[in-house]
């Protein structure tokens, strides 16, 4: 009888352990060094940038409110959804360059073939950036994802938010389900599409030196345990036409290159235009 009880207890502990969140440091609280010395993303435990040249950001209350503080920082104002800290990434960069930032995490165990997993993360648009974008997705891979550029990484996400998230006051959940192929061990969050495939909405103009879209990220989740997933957010069909830059002209309407220190007009495939001044 005692042996049976021990076996049942071991099975219960094993199941309970396997049902936990597989994302270590899911709410960006744990660090391996002090996060109080300016740029602090390298201080984060378990999280890295897959790109060797791009730099996602880590926001913590001990940093300056003029830089990477919480809730005040150089990109906006936002309290952490859980705990005291969160990360931030560029999801769109204005112009011809599809500049991106990503965050990557090694899961606590490999995924099991044929098993259903539930994933979720929360985002909030940074106030001071000029644009809001879509295409904020999650990718799972069996090997570390790496890139030698700051351009978009063309991977197929297991889930992608096709609607443009405008909300900068609250946290918005992105979530869904995934049947594993088996062996997936690395999780990456970001925009896996180039500018021609990314929909944007201009929410303001000239408020930041970074002309693009930027989102805070908190509370990343991946587990066999179901979660409450908001029905109005998740994987959906694109609801907006793809907006692609097709021509750059000067103020006289002459086609030209995308050059600095000039007044330019961007003409897009959906018929919209943008007047910009590029600084060197």
Image: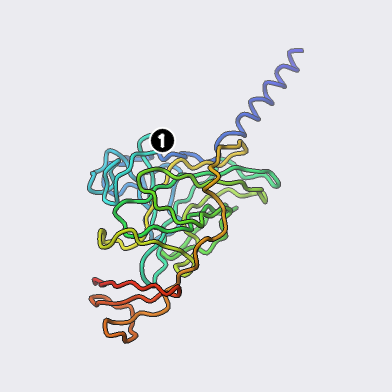
For label 1, the crowd category at 10 Å Cα-Cα, with few meaning under 14, some 14 to 19 and many 20 or more, is few
The relative height of residue 241 versus residue 63 in the rendered view (above or below) is below
The relative height of residue 125 versus residue 209 in the rendered view (above or below) is above
* Residue occupying the point 33% across, 58% down: 203
Residue 10 location, quadrant: top right
Q: Is residue 36 left or right of residue 134?
A: left
Of residue 183 and residue 260, the one placed in the foreground of this image is: 260
The relative height of residue 151 versus residue 80 in the rendered view (above or below) is below
Residue 112 location, quadrant: top right
* Residue occupying the point 35% across, 75% down: 266
**Can you identify the residue that label 1 sits on?**
82
Q: Position of residue 6 (x, y in %)?
A: 70, 18
Q: Is residue 280 left or right of residue 59?
A: left
Q: Position of residue 212 (x, y in %)?
A: 35, 61
Q: Is residue 46 left or right of residue 177?
A: left
As helix, strand or loop, the secondary structure at mark 1 comes to: loop
The relative height of residue 51 versus residue 36 in the rendered view (above or below) is below
Q: Position of residue 122 (x, y in %)?
A: 45, 44
Q: Position of residue 137 (x, y in %)?
A: 51, 54
């Amino acid at each position: 009888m005692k042996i049976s009880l021990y076996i049942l207890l071991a099975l219960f502990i094993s199941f309970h352990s396997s049902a936990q969140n597989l994302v270590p440091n899911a709410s960006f609280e744990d660090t391996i060094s002090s996060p109080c010395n300016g740029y602090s993303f390298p201080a984060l435990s378990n999280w890295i940038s897959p790109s060797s040249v791009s730099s996602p950001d880590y926001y913590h209350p001990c940093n300056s409110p003029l830089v990477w503080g919480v809730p005040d920082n150089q990109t906006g104002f936002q309290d952490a959804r859980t705990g005291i800290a969160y990360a931030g990434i560029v999801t769109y960069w204005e112009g011809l360059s599809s500049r991106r930032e990503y965050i990557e995490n090694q899961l606590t165990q490999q995924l099991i073939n044929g098993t259903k997993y539930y994933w979720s993360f929360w985002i909030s648009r940074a106030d001071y950036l000029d644009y809001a974008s879509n295409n904020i997705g999650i990718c799972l891979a069996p090997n570390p994802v790496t890139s030698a550029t700051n351009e978009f990484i063309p991977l197929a996400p297991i889930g992608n938010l096709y609607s443009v998230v405008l909300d900068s006051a609250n946290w918005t959940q992105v979530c869904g389900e995934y049947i594993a192929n088996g062996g997936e061990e690395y999780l990456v969050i970001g925009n896996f599409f180039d500018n021609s495939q990314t929909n944007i909405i201009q929410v303001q103009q000239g408020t930041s030196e970074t002309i693009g879209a930027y989102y805070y990220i908190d509370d990343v989740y991946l587990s066999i345990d179901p979660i409450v997933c908001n029905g109005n957010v998740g994987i959906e069909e694109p609801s907006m036409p793809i907006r692609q830059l097709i021509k750059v002209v000067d103020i006289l309407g002459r086609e030209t290159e995308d050059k600095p220190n000039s007044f330019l007009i961007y003409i897009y495939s959906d018929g919209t235009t943008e007047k910009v001044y590029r600084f060197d």
